[in-house]
Image (cartoon, helix red, strand yellow):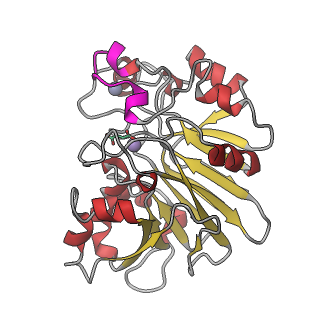
Amino acid sequence: MQIVVLGSAAGGGFPQWNCHCRMCQSVRNGTSRAQPRTQSSIAVSDDGENWVIINASPDIRQQINASPQLAKASGARGSGVRAVIVTDAQIDHTTGLLILREGLPLDLYCTKEVADELSTSYPILSMMKHWEGGYRTTTVDPASPEGWQIPSVPSLRFVPIVLDSNAPPFSPYRDRPRPGDNIGLQIVDTRTGASLFYAPGLASPAPAVLRAMDNADCVMMDGTLWTDDEMIREGLGTSLGSEMGHLSVSGDDGMLALLANFSKPRKVLIHINNTNPILDPDSPEYHAVLAAGVEVAFDGMEIHI
Ligand code: MLT
Ligand code: MN
Ligand code: ZN
């Protein structure tokens, strides 16, 4: 299985257009060695030619143009993008569905809860029907242990894992999310048994998450914030990370402590907010992540398992 990180930042990207936090300033002014990052998305393939995009970010046009792997096509128009999965209805994970309009129709996989949000609160799927019929949406059962397969990547099996996180700010289920509002994905290569676990938004790990992490050859985990009150301390917001559905990286109960329980997988932090000091490769926080045997995802990162 081949994995490409299309975008490693959280919503807003890095730098965020209107943000003057320490990290955004430093990347804008070139006063740190931090690299810019686009918003949250990965792509997976079983043959390097046919790709499934997981989470369609507002930056998807730029991300696909920056990824020659995804450009292969036979006709006058086309691409290697065969299908899209969205793991929640958040703006940073779904707005790319608008940008992909030139390539419609396309197959889309998400839970019923997310498909409903994308037809009501944020009705992208209804709008996109006007482009060649729009998305051919298959709803997936977040409780299904077998998951589903996608014909264009026949060797991969996608198994949803319910994540404890939050529903989007525009959702009637904000602060009272349903099990289908956020899923992680266990992606298994049926030829080799190798598996990836991808969870860009995770507030706390349920037993099913721990099992998926334990089985995985690679985990890509929520690296949004270094500390829970980072946004508040920086004067950038009023919400804790935990209220937004994100477990912070540091702390006794943080993501690094959680990852320390697993020895098998390659460990990668993804969905990194622009305030997070791990974006600066010269920061003590970045060095603490490396010392824990954990990597920080960057745009264009390729992983083969
Ligand atoms: C989140 O995961 O909480 C989002 O990145 C929020 C956003 O897109 O603004
Ligand atoms: Mn997000
Ligand atoms: Zn910032």
- The answer to whether residue 46 is seen in the rendering is no
Number of marks: 0
Query: Splitting the image into 4 quarters, where does residue 113 fall?
Result: bottom left
Compared across the picture, whether 216 is left or right of 250 comes to right
Residue at x-position 55% and y-position 65%: 69
From the image, which quarter does the N terminus lie in?
bottom right
Q: Nearer the viewer, residue 103 or 166?
A: 166
Queried whether the magenta region covers residue 197, the answer comes back as no
Residue at x-position 27% and y-position 69%: 125
The picture places residue 165, in percent across and down from the top left corner, at 45, 41
- The magenta stretch spans which residues? 231-244
Q: Quadrant of ligand 1?
A: top left
- The answer to whether residue 260 is seen in the rendering is yes
The picture places residue 142, in percent across and down from the top left corner, at 52, 61
From the image, which quarter does the C terminus lie in?
bottom right
Q: Nearer the viewer, residue 173 or 196?
A: 173
Q: Nearer the viewer, residue 191 or 215?
A: 215
Residue at x-position 23% and y-position 30%: 18
Query: Splitting the image into 4 quarters, where does residue 112 fall?
Result: bottom left
Give the answer, above or below, for where 172 lies relative to 159. Answer: above
Give the answer, above or below, for where 65 lies relative to 211. Answer: below
Compared across the picture, whether 232 is left or right of 149 comes to left
The picture places residue 30, in percent across and down from the top left corner, at 40, 24
Give the answer, above or below, for where 45 lies relative to 220. Answer: below
Compared across the picture, whether 193 is left or right of 115 comes to right
Query: Splitting the image into 4 quarters, where does residue 45 fall?
Result: bottom right
Compared across the picture, whether 262 is left or right of 14 comes to right
